[in-house]
Image: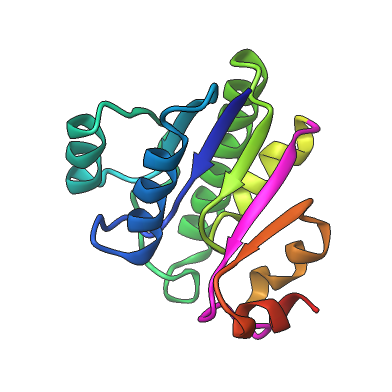
Amino acid sequence: MKLLVCSHTGVFRGGAERSLLLLSNSLSDKKIDFVINIPDKSKELIAELEYHNLKYVTIYKDSDKRPINTVSYVVLLKKFLRRVIYIFKLYRFIRKNNIDIVYLNTLRTTSEYIAAKLARKKTVMHLRGFDSKSNMRFKILHHVDKFIVLNNSARKIIL
């Protein structure tokens, strides 16, 4: 079985990355090919993954981190096009490498969810207590195949 893990916080010391490393350590002795997608240039996370001999792929999303409400229409259009290109690059990677399951390590993985569904792959989302219904990405939760929750607060979000 091949598992693609998608995480988006971009900082190694964040909870998503720590849980990513815990997951990889717990799966290391199983018959699972574990690949991590890094959409940003997170040098600290990449160094940690290399230290633990974990496989990763970098498919860059967008280096422009400005919020969409602060940019011009031209920049907004460029950001949208980069996002669409990212989704199709990830889709191609999923199909080419016969990925079975896409594990979404944060709620910020909407593009990865779209790529997985285009490729007709199962999705598992790790939902944390700080994610909330006010988040615009919440709408995809109704279509995710499985959830991992850490506490009752997170569980109530999906009920």
Horizontal and vertical percent for residue 74?
Answer: 50, 56
Query: Where, by quadrant of the figure, is residue 122 drawn?
Result: top right
Judging from the image, the colouring scheme is rainbow
From what the image shows, is residue 30 above or below residue 24?
A: above
Residue 89 image point, x, y percent = 56, 28
In this picture, is 135 found above or below 62?
below
Residue 156 % position (x, y): 71, 83
Q: Which residues are magenta?
A: 120-134
Instruction: Tell me, yes or no, whether the highlighted magenta stretch contains residue 127.
Output: yes
Q: Nearer the viewer, residue 121 or 86?
A: 121
Q: Quadrant of the C terminus?
A: bottom right
Q: Quadrant of residue 140?
A: bottom right
Q: Is 100 covered by the magenta stretch?
A: no
Residue 55 screen position, x and y as percent: 36, 25
Residue at the image point whose x is 74% and y is 65% from the top? 141
Residue displayed at 37% across by 40% down: 25
2 sits to left or right of 79: right
Q: Which picture quadrant has residue 132?
A: bottom right
Find the residue positioned furthest to the top: 96
For the N terminus, the quadrant is top right
Judge by depth and name the residue closer to the eye, 87 or 151.
151
- Judged left or right of residue 19, residue 145 is right
Q: Residue furthest front?
A: 29
Q: Residue at x 46, y 67 (%)?
A: 72
Magenta-colored segment: predominant secondary structure: loop
Q: State whether residue 71 is above or below residue 101.
A: below
Q: Nearer the viewer, residue 81 or 72?
A: 81
